[in-house]
């Protein structure tokens, strides 16, 4: 038994359901809603908190979680400067980071059942609007996907940003929309706007030489990317049919899995694997706005849609960890946000 949450356009801006091989009855909306369009959503690694990145001040909103939304936490004393695009908790749950529209483009805080005092900004910031943020599974690094070259920027992390790592020698092509580390921390992948739409690298305290592109590419603009919890698979949510594309992963892309028998209804905005790796969900641009499938080295038969649908375009989807995160849990799965 777990839970699943989506961030979306239109009030209540975040919607959540129990999850048990399918959607349960929608949870009651938060008593204090996010202020505007939900762009990204993440559960804390212990599953006790949930955060939403959104349009409108305070740009990030967080709640205790216990089979539903608790009373909203106090806003950060120093807010992100503009629209929150993505949000992630560190693997130990002690920090939270927000990707956002204006400089410094990423803002981070200590986390202990609420926001602590903002960390100092990176000395070298991402180059423009950031759309996705992820911590490495060991918590020693943080990466940001963003507009403008180099499209992905990474830093050592130790209760604050270290000196920026050297950019990849071959950068992603086009806007970086999302970033994810593999569960073992040995690889990093970026979903981006131009062909090949997803780019991956070995990771060892910095970017290695770019992996060969998939032999069959996603069909268009990559909006989001996620590794399965065991690290054996990688999925990309994207524009154009089939809207989600997945591959085996073993230090590089394997042969594309067969498309789902029932495709998502429209552009894939975000993708997430369940913590046990048995399911995969895709946030969508049109009704039913979220679609999920069993997963076992490929897509199973689509689950029934939620009885109460999200009200509009979903930009982020996240599963709640099961009481304690499995060793392979990667908070990067919980992302995110997309530019409208």
Image (spheres, grey):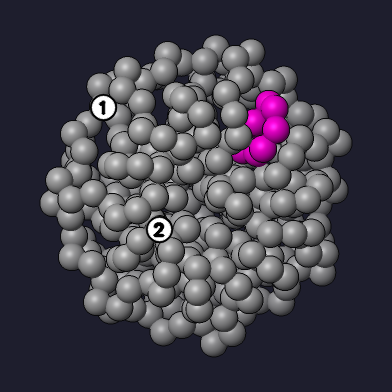
**Where residue 120 appears, x then y in whole percent?**
42, 14
Name the one closer to the observer, 318 or 112. 318
Q: Is residue 298 visible?
A: yes
Crowd rating for badge 2 (residues with CA inside 10 Å; few <14, some 14–19, many 20+)? many
Tell me the element at label 2. loop
> Can you say which quadrant of the picture contains the N terminus?
bottom right
Q: Which residue is mark 1?
A: 164
Q: Position of residue 150 (x, y in %)?
A: 28, 42
Q: In the shown orientation, is residue 39 left or right of residue 259?
A: right
Quadrant hosting residue 25:
bottom right
Residue occupying the point 34% across, 48% down: 181
Task: Judge whether 297 appears above or below 40 on screen.
Answer: below
Q: Let me know if residue 277 appears in the view.
A: no
Work out whether residue 35 or residue 206 is closer to the camera in this orientation and state it: 35
Q: Which residue is identified by label 2?
A: 193
Residue 249, position as x, y percentages in the image: 29, 66
Q: Is residue 63 left or right of residue 173?
A: right
| Closer to the camera in the image, 297 or 180 | 180
What span is colored magenta in the figure? 53-61
Q: Residues within 10 Å of mark 1 (few under 14, many from 20)?
A: some
Is 211 positioned to the left or the right of 46 in the image?
Answer: left
Disc 1 to disc 2, C-alpha distance: 23 Å
Q: Specify which label sits upstream in the sequence, 1 or 2.
A: 1
The quadrant holding residue 233 is bottom left
Taking the magenta stretch, the answer to whether it contains residue 46 is no
């Amino acid at each position: 038994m777990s839970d699943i949450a989506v961030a979306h356009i239109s009030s209540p801006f975040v919607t959540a359901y129990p999850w048990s091989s399918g959607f349960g009855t929608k949870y009651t909306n938060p008593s204090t809603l996010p202020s505007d369009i939900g762009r990204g959503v993440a559960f804390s690694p212990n599953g006790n908190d949930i955060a939403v990145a959104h349009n409108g001040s305070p740009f990030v909103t967080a709640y205790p979680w216990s089979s539903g939304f608790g009373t909203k936490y106090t806003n950060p004393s120093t807010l992100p400067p503009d629209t929150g695009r993505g949000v992630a908790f560190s693997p130990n749950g002690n920090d939270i980071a927000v990707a956002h529209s204006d400089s410094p483009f990423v803002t981070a805080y200590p986390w202990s059942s609420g926001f602590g005092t903002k960390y100092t900004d990176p000395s070298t910031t991402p180059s423009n609007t950031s759309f996705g943020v992820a911590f490495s599974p060991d918590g020693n690094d943080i990466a940001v996907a963003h507009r403008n070259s180099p499209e992905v920027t990474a830093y050592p992390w130790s209760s604050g940003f270290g000196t920026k790592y050297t950019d990849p020698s071959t950068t992603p092509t086009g806007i970086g929309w999302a970033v994810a580390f593999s569960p073992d921390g040995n690889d990093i992948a970026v979903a981006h706007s131009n062909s090949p739409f997803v780019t991956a690298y070995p990771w060892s305290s910095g970017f290695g030489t770019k992996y060969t592109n998939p032999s069959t590419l996603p069909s268009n603009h990559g909006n989001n990317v996620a590794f399965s919890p065991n690290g054996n698979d990688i999925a990309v949510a994207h524009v154009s049919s089939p809207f989600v594309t997945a591959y085996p992963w073993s230090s590089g892309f394997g042969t594309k899995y067969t498309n789902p028998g029932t495709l998502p209804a429209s552009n894939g905005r975000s993708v997430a694997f369940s913590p046990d790796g048995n399911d995969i969900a895709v946030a969508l641009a049109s009704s039913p706005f979220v679609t999920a499938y069993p997963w076992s080295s490929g897509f199973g038969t689509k689950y029934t849609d939620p009885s109460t649908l999200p009200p509009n375009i979903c930009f982020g989807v996240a599963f709640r960890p099961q009481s304690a995160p499995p060793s392979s849990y990667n908070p990067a799965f919980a992302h995110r946000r997309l530019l409208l």
